[in-house]
Image (cartoon, rainbow, N blue to C red):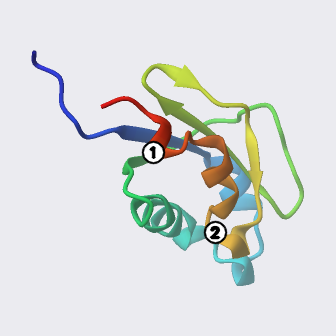
Amino acid sequence: MGETSTRETQAQVCHRCLMRLETSAGGVDLPRRIRATLAARGEAVRVELTGCLGWCPVGRVSVQLRRAGELSDVVLLDPERDGAELLTHLPCPSTETP
């Protein structure tokens, strides 16, 4: 009865990965770009910086999604793609039950 129809996805972005990126990679701006990419798909998104997720990729950023209490695998993002890799880790909205 008290359910909301809005889905919320939490994207946990590794702060260490962001700090290791070269300035030209746009790491400072990446959380905002991730939020915009997921919001364009209709997701209610909260992006949070977190500690190490156990992966230390060179030139990439580790991100983990939490949705409805479930965690995705760690996704290694290319900072130039604005988080587009995360879209494959979310269920298609048309297949979800309201």
Q: Residue furthest left?
A: 1
Q: Nearer the viewer, residue 17 or 76?
A: 76
First-in-chain label (1 vs 2): 2
Give the residue pinned by disc 2.
Answer: 27
Residue 73 image point, x, y percent: 72, 31
| As drawn, 15 above or below 72 | below
Quadrant location, the N terminus: top left
The label shown at residue 69 is none
Residue 8, horizontal then vertical, whole percent:
35, 39
Considering the numbered disc 2 on the image, is that residue within a helix, a strand or a loop? Answer: helix
Q: Amino acid at mark 1?
A: Ser
Could you tell whether 52 is left or right of 71 in the image? Answer: right
Residue extending furthest toward the right: 58
* Residue visible at 69% across and 49% down in the picture: 16
Q: CA distance from mark 1 to mark 2?
A: 32 Å
Q: Amino acid at mark 2?
A: Gly
Find residue 53 and report its image quarter. Answer: top right
Examine the rendered structure and indicate whether residue 26 appears above or below residue 13.
Answer: below
List the single residue furthest toward the top: 1
Please identify the quarter of the rendering in which residue 3 is found: top left
Give the image location of residue 6, x and y in percent.
25, 40
The answer to which image quadrant residue 18 occupies is bottom right
Q: Quadrant of the image for the C terminus?
A: top left
Describe residue 36's horizontal placement relative to residue 85 as left or right.
left
Residue under the image location 18 percent in, 31 percent down: 4
User: Is disc 1 surrounded by few (<14), some (14 to 19) or many (20+) residues within 10 Å?
Assistant: few
Residue 66 in picture, x, y percent from top left: 51, 31
Q: Identify residue for label 1.
A: 94
How many marks do you count on the picture? 2
Judged left or right of residue 29, residue 2 is left
